[in-house]
Image (spheres, grey):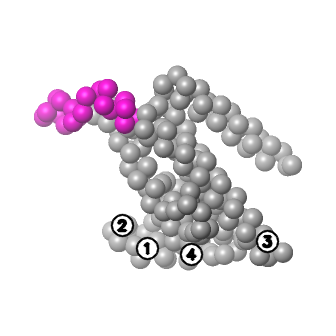
Amino acid sequence: MTAPNRVKQERYARAHERLKLALEHGFHIEAAMICESIITDRLHSHLHWRVEVAGLCTLDDVVARLSQKKVFRGNPPQISLTKSSSLFVLIMAMGLDFDDLGLERHQNLPKRLDRWRGDRNKITHNITYTRPDLKSYAEAFDDFMATAEKCATEGTVLVRCLNDWDRAVRRRHQQGAG
């Protein structure tokens, strides 16, 4: 194993330890943020693998196909193999070439990730935000925290599912090429 892979594996192990502790101690917002970091990294890594390692597409192809989607409102999507990209763009890129491996746990994975991203956005931005003219909240704090717990729990499921899917896609490609 190369040194960079070892360092990355160690970092992932520590992130998963921290995720487990956050869930055990009820720090659900932190757990959801750790899930986001892992999911974003896995999606970015998968895109890099598709373009640079497997040669299944080019980054220009991905940008062109994403640009055709109405969700970007005429602005070209910002996506890179060497710089961070938004979770939204990475999920949309995954959806372009989503390999449905016929396993129930992978069904609708891009849509499930995007729904989770929306929930993650809510807990990230709404812990204290309210309209300045209202000075009240759409939900009680306990309800907000229940939403955060649900988001963290679903995030851990999606982390495992995405890791499993990514490994399966890479394995299938290697078997097909070998």
Q: How far apart are marks 1 and 4 (CA)?
A: 10 Å
Assign a secondary structure to mark 3: helix
What whole-number distance in Å separates the C-alpha atoms at marks 3 and 1? 32 Å
Q: Is residue 136 magenta?
A: yes
Q: Badge 2 is on which residue?
A: 71
Q: What stretch is highlighted in magenta?
A: 130-148
- Above or below: residue 86 compared with residue 122: below
Q: Which residue shows up at 65% across the image and 54% down it?
A: 164
Image-based side of 1 in relation to 39, left or right: right
Q: Of all residues shown, which one is farthest toward the right?
A: 1
Q: Mark 3 points at which residue?
A: 175
Give the Cα separation between the discs numbered 3 and 4.
27 Å
- Residue 60 is labelled as 4
Q: Quote the CA–CA distance across marks 2 and 1.
A: 9 Å
Task: Write down the quadrant of residue 98 in the picture.
Answer: bottom right
Measured Cα–Cα span from mark 2 to mark 4: 18 Å
